[in-house]
Image (spheres, rainbow, N blue to C red):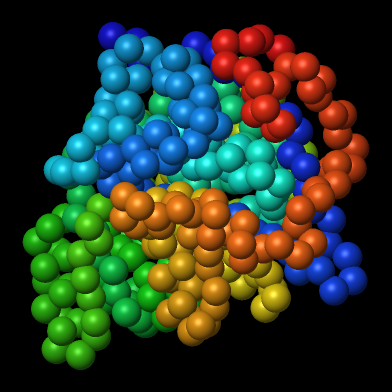
Amino acid sequence: MTQTPRTIVRPASPRAVTSGAGRSRLVFLLPGRAAARPGMGRAAYHAEPVVRAEVDAALAALDGPLADGTREVLLGPATGDVPAGLADPALFVLEYALTRLLADRGLTPDAVLGYGVGEVTAACVAGVLDPADALRLVAAHGRLHADLPPTATLAVGLPYADVAAQLAPEVRLVALDTPESCVVAGPEPELRRLERTLAQLYVTCHRPAAPVAAHPDQVTPRLGEVAAALAGAALRPPAIRWLSTVSGRPVSADEAGDPDHWLRQLRQPVRFAEAARQLAGDDRLVEVGPGATLAALLRQTTPGVPVLPALPDGPDGDGPATVLAALPDGHDAPAAAPGRDRPDPTNDTRAGTPRPGRSD
């Protein structure tokens, strides 16, 4: 049974807000699998025509079973768990739709930073990946994660350098969340043993509600389908600053054009703490996705850092209105990104929103 996307329309080139004197950068934070929850797109889908058009276009580009499952995760009841194979496609579809909604309201970022599948959304917003290629990539992610054996994960309240000596060979680092915390993955018996050892040292640990990343030893043999999904992708230099959680730093034009970036992204630890160090103190941060998982990580190292939610928890949260009210100055007239052709406005249903079903 094939579950690959057909085709969706490439969006307008990103319109970066150029930071000038006295103007702070607008940064979009795109969360990963830990943010996924059933029904996470329902309120925005029914309230916002731009979101509805983007979600419908993406679902139409997916094959039936994957489209049906993704629709259920996004729009179904807010109960149960998100299946492993659907978290990445559903998060990408929702996050990308929210970025198009914010663009429609005049908010486009100076920089993007994504965690896990949020890295794919970040690359798409930065103009590196077409949404059709990104959708093929996250569909391959979903198939890979659905095929993985169950793996336990443990968030540890210590720097990885202090945890490494306690790890059994089968337990591997999967995320550097903050300078003072990390996430490891491995067999359940080994993680229980590690928990007991750390408890005796009064180290705080907890089990993430969902695995933030997969065990690299399980991922590596299964990367063939992801590589195939990348084979026809057109990779372009970033049009705006893209802070990568693969390297922990801004992505260069050469790196953006290397398909191996996306294979490393699945088998290497998520370096959110290192990428977050690239943020400036006066940056305006917006978490573009469900909940506030990345805001919570940033607050651990920078208490009081303001991160606006584009999609707050709760059925009645009005994320876009909150963001617009908080960012009135300097972000209401985006300038064209240098070196990018502007699209034909007749190809848009609304400003910045591609018409579903049209081809390039």
Residue at image location 45% in from the left, 63% down from the top = 294
Q: Where does the N terminus fall, quadrant-wise?
A: top left
> Where is residue 73 shown, x and y percent of the image?
28, 34
Depth check: give the residue in front, 195 or 277.
277
Query: Which image quarter: residue 348?
Result: top right
> Can residue 242 be seen in the rendering of this structure?
no
> Can residue 69 be seen in the rendering of this structure?
yes
Is 264 situated above or below 69? below
> Where is residue 5 shown, x and y percent of the image?
46, 16
Depth check: give the residue in front, 108 or 241.
108
Residue at image location 44% in from the left, 38% down from the top = 47
Is 7 situated above or below 333? above
Residue at image location 75% in from the left, 57% down from the top = 331
> Where is residue 211 shown, x and y percent of the image?
28, 52
> Where is residue 166 shown, x and y percent of the image?
26, 76
Residue at image location 49% in from the left, 42% down from the top = 95
Query: Which image quarter: residue 96?
Result: top right
Query: Which image quarter: residue 233?
Result: top right
Q: Where does the C terminus fall, quadrant-wise?
A: top right
Would you say 203 lies left or right of 273 here? Answer: left
Depth check: give the residue in front, 278 or 334.
334
Is 245 situated above or below 263? below
Would you say 222 lies left or right of 137 here? Answer: left
| Residue that lies at the very extreme toward the bottom in this rendered image | 201
